Image (cartoon, rainbow, N blue to C red):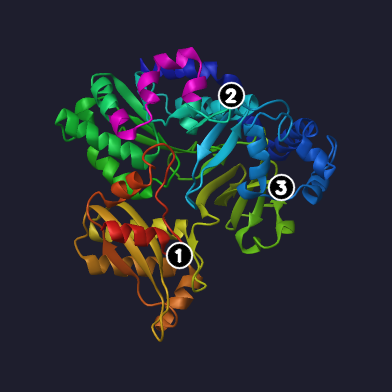
């Protein structure tokens, strides 16, 4: 039956599989097409007219004319769009906005979601994920039952303009075709419950008796849900609840710290994990080959890509197109999209692992790092070091964050790691030593500062009490959805709040 279902899915999506094969072979031709289409839309907007940009300008002219921006630069225009103005950033009116707090601040961002970005980017990404998985894993039972999706919520904005905002996942649920309801759980009324804890309880009551064969969402919040399902059913393994469970499609945060915990509660060799890179701003990449962590950059979703080397963030003129990227370089990703974002620095950093086809891995955030002493520590370094320390000591990490310990008087600086363990390390000192040693191996700047304790002393690892991160996120009203625990910060605001709860 699984072979038949996957064969049908592959047949339905055969046109898309051919399109994916085309941009694998002709990436720059496809990106050039996307650029021309976007220019035709952009020329109808006030934003393009403000900068004197027309529909037929070259890529070089576009880069010279339109500035690289962040959310703060666009906030005024986005607020006008939310208030009901049309043709500001995209032709016509935009009525939906993905509400995102990101990991770098407390103020909400409202990302425009146009009809084009829904159909040509977000939904296409979801369909392509299914198509690629079914094509490469015809023996899997993942789509023979229902897929459990833990989404967010939406509400009517008090703007009087009719604009609505909410988590991207809730917007996608709200606009999904009716036939999707036959493949997905929970029901829409449960999926859109705004209170995260109430939603989890409702999912347990409804879905523990359903035939769930796959689930999708953010690893951290899904782990909370899955552990609650185990408590609710009185079982030790999710396979006792859902025997045919065989796929987790995940994204939003790195899966590395959670992998062992999922293996513990789903002890099956048939269970597969597939990463996607989808954000409020767009759907960007899919892990097509599950034997490697790299993701295929999707090039025909109405997104034109540019990349700015992180070491050149001070000089926007150093941004390059896909034609000029190199492997092994840490880039800030810049996008122009069919959601009306023009040369928008999304805040994520990526590294290319292949140029034929173009494959990436997410390395961190442009504003989520520690560089208090010139060590340039990024999330990718942190995730790998935490994983190595966990393997060395048999630990399983639930959540963590890290921040600098600043120099005072004659004391040298250091890093403080606040770690909540699902399984504590067999040797806490070895955990800290492995963490430190791995960071030095991965990051030459960190190694230079740690050399003979020149600038940095060994890291300090503080063991968090059970549930501290959950209570902290709850106190900030950031449970569920796309809310994330900030992994690294260049100041102590997050870690000091956590230590107070501790």
SS of the residue under disc 3: helix
Looking at the rendered image, the quarter that the N terminus falls into is top left
Q: Is-magenta flag for residue 173?
A: yes
Q: Disc 3 and disc 1: Cα gap in Å? A: 37 Å
Q: Nearer the viewer, mark 3 or mark 1?
A: 1
Question: Relative to 89, is 250 on the left or the right?
Answer: left
Quarter of the image for residue 297 reads: top right
Q: Is-magenta flag for residue 379?
A: no
Q: Residues within 10 Å of mark 3 (few under 14, many from 20)?
A: few
Q: Which residue is mark 3?
A: 323
Q: Which mark is residue 491?
A: 1
Q: Residues within 10 Å of mark 1 (few under 14, many from 20)?
A: some
Q: Which residue is mark 2?
A: 162
SS of the residue under disc 2: loop
Quarter of the image for residue 356 reads: top right
Q: Tell how many labels.
A: 3
Give me the residue at 24% from left, 60% from top: 393
Of all residues shown, which one is farthest toward the left? 234
Q: Nearer the viewer, mark 2 or mark 1?
A: 2
Residue 150 x, y percent position in the rendering? 37, 30
Query: Looking at the image, do the residues carrying marks 2 and 1 touch, with CB atoms under 8 Å apart?
Result: no
Closer to the camera in the image, 152 or 287: 152
Give me the residue at 27% from left, 34% from top: 226
Looking at the rendered image, the quarter that the C terminus falls into is bottom left
Quarter of the image for residue 464 reads: bottom left
Q: Disc 2 and disc 1: Cα gap in Å? A: 39 Å
Give the residues in magenta: 172-200
Residue 312 x, y percent position in the rendering? 66, 62
Closer to the camera in the image, 202 or 157: 157
Q: Residues within 10 Å of mark 2 (few under 14, many from 20)?
A: some
Query: Looking at the image, do the residues carrying marks 3 and 1 touch, with CB atoms under 8 Å apart?
Result: no
């Amino acid at each position: 039956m699984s072979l038949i279902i996957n064969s049908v899915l592959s047949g339905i999506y055969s046109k898309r599989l051919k399109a994916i094969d085309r941009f694998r072979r002709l990436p720059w031709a496809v990106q050039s097409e996307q650029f021309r289409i976007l220019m035709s839309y952009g020329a109808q907007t006030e934003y393009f007219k403000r900068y004197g940009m027309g529909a037929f300008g070259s890529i070089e002219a576009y880069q010279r004319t339109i500035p690289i921006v962040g959310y703060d630069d666009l906030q005024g225009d986005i607020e006008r769009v939310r208030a009901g103005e049309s043709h500001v950033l995209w032709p016509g009116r935009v009525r939906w906005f993905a509400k995102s707090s990101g990991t770098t601040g407390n103020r909400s961002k409202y990302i425009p979601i146009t009809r084009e970005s829904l159909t040509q980017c977000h939904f296409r990404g979801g369909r392509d994920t299914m198509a690629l998985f079914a094509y490469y894993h015809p023996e899997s039972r993942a789509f023979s039952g229902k897929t459990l999706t833990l989404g967010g919520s939406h509400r009517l904005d008090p703007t009087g303009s009719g604009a609505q905002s909410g988590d991207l996942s809730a917007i996608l649920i709200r606009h999904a075709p009716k036939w999707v309801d036959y493949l997905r759980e929970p029901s829409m009324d449960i999926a859109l419950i705004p209170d995260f804890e109430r939603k989890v309880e409702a999912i347990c009551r409804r879905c523990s008796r359903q035939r769930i064969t796959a689930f999708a969402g953010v690893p951290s919040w899904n782990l909370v849900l899955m552990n609650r399902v185990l408590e609710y059913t009185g079982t030790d393994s999710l396979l006792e609840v859902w025997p045919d469970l065989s796929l987790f499609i995940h994204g939003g945060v790195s899966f590395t710290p959670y992998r062992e915990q999922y293996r513990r509660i789903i002890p099956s060799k048939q269970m597969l994990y597939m990463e996607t890179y989808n954000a409020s701003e767009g759907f960007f990449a899919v892990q097509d080959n599950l034997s490697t962590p790299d993701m295929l950059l999707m090039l025909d979703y109405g997104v034109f890509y540019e990349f700015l080397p992180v070491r050149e963030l001070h000089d926007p003129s150093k941004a390059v197109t896909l034609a000029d990227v190199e492997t092994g370089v840490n880039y800030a990703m810049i996008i122009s999209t069919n959601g009306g974002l023009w040369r928008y620095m999304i805040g994520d950093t990526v590294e290319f692992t292949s140029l034929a086809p173009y494959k990436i891995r997410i390395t961190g955030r442009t504003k989520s790092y520690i560089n208090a002493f010139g060590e340039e520590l990024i999330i990718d370094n942190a995730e790998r070091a935490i994983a190595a320390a966990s393997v060395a000591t048999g630990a399983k990490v639930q959540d963590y964050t890290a921040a600098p310990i600043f120099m005072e008087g004659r004391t040298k600086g250091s890093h403080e790691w606040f770690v909540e363990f699902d399984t504590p390390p067999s040797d806490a000192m070895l955990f800290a030593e492995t963490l430190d040693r791995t960071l030095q191996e991965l990051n030459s700047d960190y190694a230079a500062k740690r050399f003979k304790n020149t600038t940095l002393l060994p890291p300090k690892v503080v063991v968090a009490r059970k549930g501290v991160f959950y209570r902290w996120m709850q106190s900030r009203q950031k449970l569920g959805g796309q809310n994330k625990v900030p992994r690294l910060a260049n100041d102590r605001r997050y870690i000091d709040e956590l230590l107070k709860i501790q």
